[in-house]
Image (cartoon, rainbow, N blue to C red):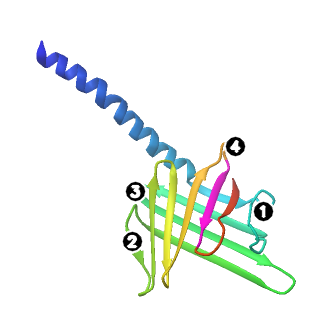
Amino acid sequence: MRQNMRKIFLGSVLGPVLFAASAMAANHHSLNGTWTLEPTRSHLDGEPAIQTGSVTINDREHNITVTHSFSYDGANESFEYSFSTDGRENSSIHQGKSFKTKAKWEGEVLRVTTLDNGASTVERYSLAPDGSLMLVVERPEHRPVTLFFERQ
């Protein structure tokens, strides 16, 4: 009788925990895919207006790939920026002596931290309530930038 009670107790405790863990993992895959920038919805807080951009996220069995590309064409300047990270979740990817990046999940938010020549940039990817991808970028001595993307 006591053993049966113990099994029932363990089942009632472990069942919801395992279900929640699998639900969170499934939600991580909801960011997978290619997303296109919605420049009119994005908040750049004084930064040059990005006109086109895309983000591709692929989380597969705890290997996370994030690739993004942005371009800006202004009257006096233009630039293109591309970046990609690919590695095991929570592992540090090194490129040279002064560049390191790490991607990890914090609940339902994918956090990518990049250290480049001592300056740290944090990118947080999450789903907005309307199903779009929201990217918040925090850099030293800059206000946060919020970009919105729609699924391609």
Mark linked to residue 130: 4
Give the residue at the far front of this rendering. Answer: 141
Determine the secondary structure under disc 1. Answer: loop
The amino acid marked with disc number 3 is His
The residue carrying mark 1 is 39
| Measured Cα–Cα span from mark 1 to mark 2 | 31 Å
Neighbours of disc 3 within 10 Å: few (<14), some (14-19), many (20+):
some
x and y percentages locating residue 28 in the rendered image:
50, 49
x and y percentages locating residue 65 in the rendered image:
50, 64
The amino acid marked with disc number 2 is Ser
| Measured Cα–Cα span from mark 1 to mark 4 | 16 Å
Quarter occupied by the C terminus: bottom right
The residue carrying mark 2 is 92
Mark linked to residue 125: none
The amino acid marked with disc number 1 is Pro
Label 3 or label 4, whichever lies nearer to me, is: 4
User: Toward the viewer: 94 or 142?
Assistant: 142
Callouts 3 and 1 close, C-beta under 8 Å: no
Q: Residue at x 41, y 40 (%)?
A: 22
Which comes sooner in the sequence, label 1 or label 2? 1
Magenta span covers which residues? 132-139
